[in-house]
Amino acid sequence: MRTEQPKMIYLKDYQVPDYLIDETHLTFELFEDHTLVHAQLVMRRNPDAGAGLPALVLDGQQLELLELKLDDRVLGAADYQLTDSHLTLQPTQEQFVIDSSVRIHPESNTALEGLYKSSGMFCTQCEAEGFRKITYYLDRPDVMSTFTTTLSAEQHRYPVLLSNGNPIASGSEEGGRHWATWEDPFKKPAYLFALVAGDLWCVEDRFTTMSAREVTLRIYVEPENIDKVQHAMDSLKKSMKWDEEVYGREYDLDIFMIVAVNDFNMGAMENKGLNIFNSSCVLAKAETATDAAHQRVEAVVAHEYFHNWSGNRVTCRDWFQLSLKEGFTVFRDAEFSADMNSRTVKRIEDVAYLRTHQFAEDAGPMAHPVRPDSFMEISNFYTLTVYEKGSEVLRMIHTLLGPQLFRKGSDLYFARHDGQAVTCDDFIKAMEDASGVDLTQFKRWYSQAGTPRLEVSESYDAAANTYRLQLRQSCPATPGQAEKLPFVIPLELALLDAQGRELPLQLVGEDKPVGTSRVLQVTQAEQAFTFVNIAEQPLPSLLRGFSAPVKLSFPYSRDQLMFLMQHDSDGFNRWEAGQQLAVQVLQELIGQHQRGELLVLDPRLVAALRSVLENDSLDQAMVAEMLSLPGEGYLTEISDVADVDAIHAAREFARAQLAEALFEPLWARYQANREVSRNTPYVAESAHFARRSLQNIALSYLMLTGKPQVLAAALEQYEACDNMTERLTALAVLVNSPFEAEKAEALKAFAEHFKDNALVMDQWFSVQAACTLPGGLARVQALMQHPAFTMKNPNKVRALIGAFAGQNLVNFHAADGSGYRFLADQVISLNATNPQIASRQLGPLTRWRKYDASRQALMRAELERILASGELSSDVFEVVSKSLA
Ligand code: B3K
Ligand code: ZN
């Protein structure tokens, strides 16, 4: 907890460190009621920091200092100053050695930052500033050191002792204890330090690198989970191979380890050679994990592995540069997933997520640039903007340079900066130097917050055979940034003729056409492009593949959108046309609901989806994506004032109408796919994901009809399937149905069967938390009393409270404010135990400006109540105070 108002930290105040740490030697003595940490730091004055010997200020929090030595001389209390966040002392020479011993309490660490215990094992989480809770240190990413780590613990309870790098020695001690020493030869910042001690089993495998080095791969889990590790291991080997092939990056230590822990604030952490994972991102097998969970495991394993180069070998100079490693690594893992599965489907999922959640963040009180220029609490900046928009920025560079020059740029970046802590500007400079492309204006994507709008209009001159696109870009004001300068927007497009064929694209001034799909660079606030030799009025296919993270508008008619849905040769844009058509239709229904009129669904949406369903040549996953109506979250994001009830009513009405009108083809598709699923053992591969996704969305529509044969089908699927994807969907459709007896029976049977599997119980909680039937809050409150629920476990908080506030919009936004009051109570309680998780749960309340005056007042009142609730963590204080500003 803070003792004073947290201070704002600015990028412009960055200064190089006064001192450097060349070697770090750590010894941990792990006990049940405390841990002793001895640190020897071999230090020197930073030659880049100027003259003289300034005071040395080490970071340290919640540490009990037992002994401090400077070059073997024991220091007395008069030789240093100690506060609750720093230890200050005066070096007398350019080079010196500090020895410290501290006592810490991992056994009572509920914030899950620093060294803590999870299900009986010791583990660490140091990014961003957790290492200072382990020992006194220069806890900043531009201080890079080699580490040797010795851990000792009771052998019986903690047979496995791990840290970064390679194991170099181990042995037994008196009294049933043992020890191990690990050495990491690569210099690294303290945020990449890790330690694990526990009773773990591992699956071991090997990987031969491109230069024929043998690497041992190990995934450590609790013994009862050893049967759920193979998918992660396969994903790891695929990632290692992909990074060699696509980026030329080879692994560098003799061993690579992953450890699964049950209590973890995020998905996973890329500690050098010793990745620590939330068990939800490692464990996967057919019976307990859905297809989505399998794909998430594959993506997160890849993401953390890829950090070994984009993050570890080349790291961040300061935390403002976080997107240097995160945006780049998300882009890398997205391309990996696209190569392993369906590229178009991956793009659709990512864009839908970005537009619903990152666009909302960019339009809210926490909006910040991809490279923020200030923060109070860095933990609050592990955001969708830094990660997902950061990845879009990398994708645009890839688009502008093309794959070859981009690879030349990444090669130069890794070669030039290996072993360094650098900035986003250094990355851009490497891309520019390798490609010869000037990215000066492009860099505004790093410094300007907010989602740009791109308005496009057309004019066709039949006499001159010219087609002109007029473009206007603008970007709304965001906190601290009133005026924005134009961005560089790569606009990929094609022009389609009346048969849907792409026309050759020749701009005025060009002597011949250049392809039929190309990338235009929009660089000015207003700009026009004129195409020549266009013999008929074309239909433009704009922003193909979502080539820039902008809000595009073009006055498409519904008939034109239906045409694009059928004919656009860009798969992403076929889906996008369907989404835009659905948005137009749903917004019409929302208006009807608000005016108290009878709701009437535009039959063109029915016709469009019918032709998608009846098209056997379409990838089944694409059919499933096209059948999915835009979510309530997205409809909220694109509203000026979001009418929660009207949005819910309109979307549910449309779903029910579609289910009735398309019953035959949905039922046919469902039965055909269920038949295959029934006769095929589970395989975690994209053709199988595709079949199940269409089967499952069909079932969720069909269930809305309430027909007895559909209920029977849902029950059959629930009981007879061999995998969690089918079982959980069947459970979800029952939970959202009016069949109370069947619902209760299925929920009971599920909990009974899976009560000992925490990750499966998380899904059981989520399905119920997201159920939009009336009475949502009461159900969630009752579930909080369930023996499997605990506020101490972040996965449980996310599964129940996060799913309720984030997905169950109609219940969370109940007009009486009960949902808001509930969430505020949970944030206040979590603030005292786990500030990072508390702060994360605040997201839905920060969006208060989206709602009507009455809800705004209720939401603000809850934010005020949190602010007045006592001593707030810097995490919660920053989000609440900025939201109210
Ligand atoms: N780098 C970590 C995130 C750490 C967040 C700490 N609050 C996971 C990742 O992005 O790979
Ligand atoms: Zn990352």
Image (spheres, rainbow, N blue to C red):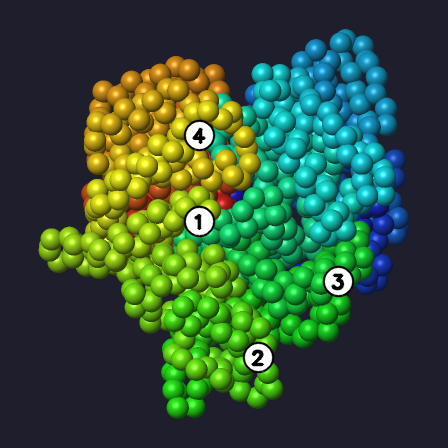
Q: Determine whether the residue tagged by mark 2 lies in a helix, strand or loop.
A: loop
Q: CA distance from mark 4 to mark 2?
A: 47 Å
- Label 1 CB, ligand 2: below 8 Å? no
Which is nearer the N-term, disc 2 or disc 3? Answer: 3
The residue lying furthest to the bottom in this view is 463
Which is nearer the N-term, disc 4 or disc 1? Answer: 1
Pinpoint residue 641: horizontal percent, then vertical percent: 27, 59
- Which residue is nearer to you in this view: 405 or 193? 405
Q: Determine whether the residue tagged by mark 4 lies in a helix, strand or loop.
A: helix
- Label 4 CB, ligand 1: below 8 Å? no
The residue wearing badge 1 is 618
Which is nearer the N-term, disc 3 or disc 1? Answer: 3
Q: CA distance from mark 4 to mark 1?
A: 18 Å
- Which residue is nearer to you in this view: 867 or 153? 153
The residue lying furthest to the top in this view is 175
Q: CA distance from mark 1 to mark 2?
A: 31 Å
Pinpoint residue 839: horizontal percent, then vertical percent: 46, 43
Confirm or deny contact between disc 3 and disc 4 (CB under 8 A).
no
The residue wearing badge 2 is 513
Task: Say the numbered circle drawn on residue 676.
Answer: 4
Q: CA distance from mark 2 to mark 3?
A: 28 Å
The residue wearing badge 3 is 408
Confirm or deny contact between disc 1 and disc 2 (CB under 8 A).
no
Q: Tell me if I can see residue 858 in this picture.
A: no
Which quadrant would residue 40 be assigned to in this image? top right
Amino acid found under the numbered disc labelled 2: Pro
The residue lying furthest to the left in this view is 597
Q: CA distance from mark 3 to mark 1?
A: 36 Å
Which is nearer the N-term, disc 4 or disc 2? Answer: 2
Amino acid found under the numbered disc labelled 1: Leu
Q: Is residue 252 left or right of residue 662?
A: right
